[in-house]
Every structure is written in structure tokens, then in C-alpha cells.
């Protein structure tokens, strides 16, 4: 079962523009993570934000977390064609000892040169 | 560190046949996960191991599915009597759990997956 929903399902922008993807989830979390997946490949971890954090940066990535609204956003600034991929948020429950990730359905990002 | 390795990359089989996939995690990682992903969807959790112990199985994992991690290193996922609905990408991931203020926060390292097509 999927934990949450991502919005939009697909996003097409020009190189140099910013891309914002949103993720909503249903239950309490220990942490929330964002992953990228190029077509036909495995997922690559981008950033992890803990439940007691509100914002985190990593290079051109900025992630926010609002636990009161059960939502997160991923901002990619100054996008490049190489950023074209699917982006997934995933949550970890505080009640799960195994660190199991529950993924959303993803946002497909297309960055046109 | 060669990353998580999965074999084969692609598998085409006929309905009713058995298939087995292999996953070699990053060597020092004690946790290993199997996920299944269909086109346009996010990965769905199947099962995970801590060392050689299988600690959780999803209800998605029917009796036809079995996973092992015999020596706490590589893992195999077997599907018996395959059905067309089993067609999917099967992803393996590993992690090394680290505690932060009493809680485990870990990121997963994924393999490139095995794409299964059941005809």
C-alpha cells in the first residue's frame, strides 16, 4: 500500500527553471526521504529530513517538512536536463523498527534544454 | 564499494514457471530489502532481512514468493508458478542502520533491479 500522494504526477519545465514537487502522507513519521529514479533504473537517495526538522538543504535541493499538515516539498533550483527523472517521497514510521520505507507514487519531471 | 548488485537484469518467463533473483548488497550493510515496482507506481515493500533473519513480510508476498538470506550476505527471491500479474521490476536495497537520539534514521541503497516479464 502507498503511504501518500505526490503532486503533480508530471511536471515539464525548461532548463534553468525551478521545480517544486509536493508529497502528502497519512500517518506519523520518523523521517521522510526523497529519492530519484532514472528510467528503468534503481532509486538513488537524495535527502532525508527527520520529523523534528522543518527544512533541509543539499546543493540545489531544498526540502521542507510540515508535520502538522503531513506534507513535504522538494525544490530543485536551476534545473538541468540531467534532472529529468521520477522523484519519490518515502516515509518511515516511528513504530517500525526495521526502517521500512513506504513510497508515494512519484512525480515525473522532464527538464527541456 | 561496488554498490548493490542484482542479477539478472531482465528475465522473461512463461506463466507457471519458477524464477529466482539474486541480490548482493553492499558488504557492510546488515539490512536488506526487497521491493516490487510496476510501471508508473512507486516501489511497494515486500520483505526485509536484518542479517540472516527475515523480520517482516508484506501481505503482498503470497505463498508463491519466498526470500532467503542464508548467511546474512546475498539474498534470493524466488517466485513459484509465476502469473502474468507478477510482471514487474523487483528492486533490492540495503542499508546500515545508524541511531540518532535513540531512533534509527537510514537511507537505502538500491540496485538497478530485475525486470520480470511473465508471458
Image (cartoon, coloured by chain):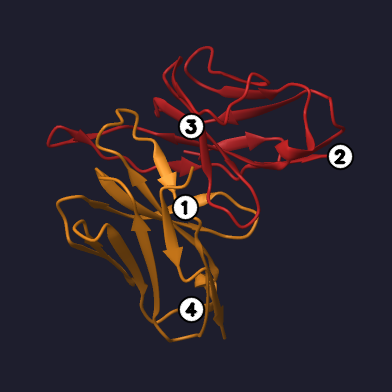
Q: Earlier in the sequence, mark 4 or mark 1?
A: 1
The residue mark sitting in front, 2 or 1, is 2
The residue mark sitting in front, 3 or 1, is 3
Q: Quadrant of the C terminus of chain B?
A: top right
* Left or right: B10 in relation to A96: right
Chain B image colour: red
Residue occupying the point 83% across, 24% down: B17
Q: Earlier in the sequence, mark 2 or mark 3?
A: 3
Q: Verify CB contact (< 8 Å) between mark 4 and mark 1.
A: no
Chain under callout 2: B
Chain under callout 1: A
Real-space Cα distance between discs 2 and 3? 26 Å
Mark 1 sits on what residue? A44
Q: Residues within 10 Å of mark 3 (few under 14, many from 20)?
A: many
Which image quadrant is residue A39 in?
bottom right
Q: Residues within 10 Å of mark 1 (few under 14, many from 20)?
A: some
Mark 3 sits on what residue? B33
Residue A57: give x, y in percent of width and height.
25, 65
The residue mark sitting in front, 4 or 3, is 3
Q: Verify CB contact (< 8 Å) between mark 2 and mark 1.
A: no
The residue mark sitting in front, 4 or 2, is 2
Residue occupying the point 17% across, 61% down: A54
Chain under callout 4: A
Residue B43: give x, y in percent of width and height.
53, 46
Mark 2 sits on what residue? B119
Real-space Cα distance between discs 4 and 3? 31 Å
For mark 3, give the secondary structure: strand
For mark 2, give the secondary structure: loop
Real-space Cα distance between discs 2 and 1? 30 Å
Residue B75: give x, y in percent of width and height.
56, 23
Amino acid at each position: 500500500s502507498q503511504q501518500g500522494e505526490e503532486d503533480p504526477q508530471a511536471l515539464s519545465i525548461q532548463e534553468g527553471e525551478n521545480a517544486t514537487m509536493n508529497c502528502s502522507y497519512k500517518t506519523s513519521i520518523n523521517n521522510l526521504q526523497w529519492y530519484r529514479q532514472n528510467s528503468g533504473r534503481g532509486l538513488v537517495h537524495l535527502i532525508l529530513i527527520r520529523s523534528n526538522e522543518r527544512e533541509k538543504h543539499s546543493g540545489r535541493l531544498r526540502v521542507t517538512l510540515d508535520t502538522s499538515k503531513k506534507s513535504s516539498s522538494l525544490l530543485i533550483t536551476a534545473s538541468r536536463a540531467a534532472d529529468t527523472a521520477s522523484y519519490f517521497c518515502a516515509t518511515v514510521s516511528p513504530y517500525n523498527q526495521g526502517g521500512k520505507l513506504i513510497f508515494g507514487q512519484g512525480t515525473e519531471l522532464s527538464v527541456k534544454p | 564499494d561496488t554498490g548493490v548488485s542484482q542479477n539478472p537484469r531482465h528475465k522473461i518467463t512463461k506463466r507457471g514457471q519458477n524464477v529466482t533473483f539474486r541480490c548482493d548488497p553492499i558488504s557492510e550493510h546488515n539490512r536488506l530489502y526487497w521491493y516490487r515496482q510496476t510501471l508508473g507506481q512507486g516501489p511497494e515493500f515486500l520483505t526485509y532481512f536484518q542479517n540472516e533473519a527475515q523480520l517482516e513480510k508484506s501481505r503482498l508476498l503470497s505463498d508463491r514468493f519466498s526470500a532467503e538470506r542464508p548467511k546474512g550476505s546475498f539474498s534470493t527471491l524466488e517466485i513459484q508458478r509465476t502469473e502474468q500479474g507478477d510482471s514487474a521490476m523487483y528492486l533490492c536495497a540495503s542499508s546500515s542502520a545508524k541511531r540518532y537520539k535513540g531512533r534509527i534514521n537510514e537511507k537505502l541503497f538500491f540496485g538497478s533491479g530485475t525486470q520480470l516479464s511473465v508471458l
